[in-house]
Amino acid sequence: MPCAHNWIGSSRWWGCDMPQQDLKETAAFLKNYITVMEHYLQVRLGLRDWHGVMDAAADLRELEAKLQVVQEICREVEDGAG
């Protein structure tokens, strides 16, 4: 099975050469960042700042895509280690 980083490019940051602990820390960071951005989105929504809502939604979409890739790489690394 090809490495998940092939889905979005060949940047070493996304590569399977990244140590598993770094991948898990990256996933935790992204999850935390998503939570922060969800709160920010709610603030922008409460202020009826539609441009801010749009920006926050776009950021969330990107963060969730990155998290999905990192989690897939983690699974591939775990499957390869076992």
Image (cartoon, helix red, strand yellow):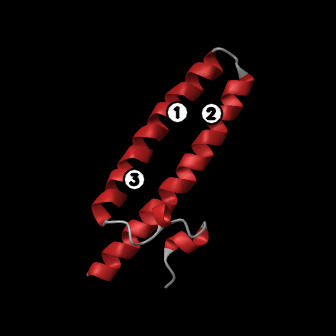
Q: Is residue 11 left or right of residue 27?
A: right
Mark closer to the chain start, 2 or 1: 1
In this rendering, is residue 75 above or below 55?
below
What residue appears at the point 67 percent right and 33 percent down from the top-left corner? 55
What residue appears at the point 39 percent right and 72 percent down from the top-left corner? 17
Q: Who is closer to the viewer here, 48 or 56?
A: 56
Residue position for label 2: 56
Residue position for label 1: 37
Rendering quarter of residue 60? top right
Residue position for label 3: 27
**Mark-to-mark CA distance, 3 and 2:** 19 Å
Mark closer to the chain start, 3 or 2: 3
Spot occupied by residue 2 in the image (x, y as percentages of width and height): 51, 82
In this rendering, is residue 44 above or below 32?
above
Spot occupied by residue 31 in the image (x, y as percentages of width and height): 42, 45
Helix or strand or loop: what does disc 2 sit on?
helix
Helix or strand or loop: what does disc 1 sit on?
helix
What residue appears at the point 52 percent right and 70 percent down from the top-left corner? 5
Q: Is residue 4 left or right of residue 74?
A: right
Q: Residues within 10 Å of mark 2 (few under 14, many from 20)?
A: many
Three-letter amino acid code at the position of disc 1? Met
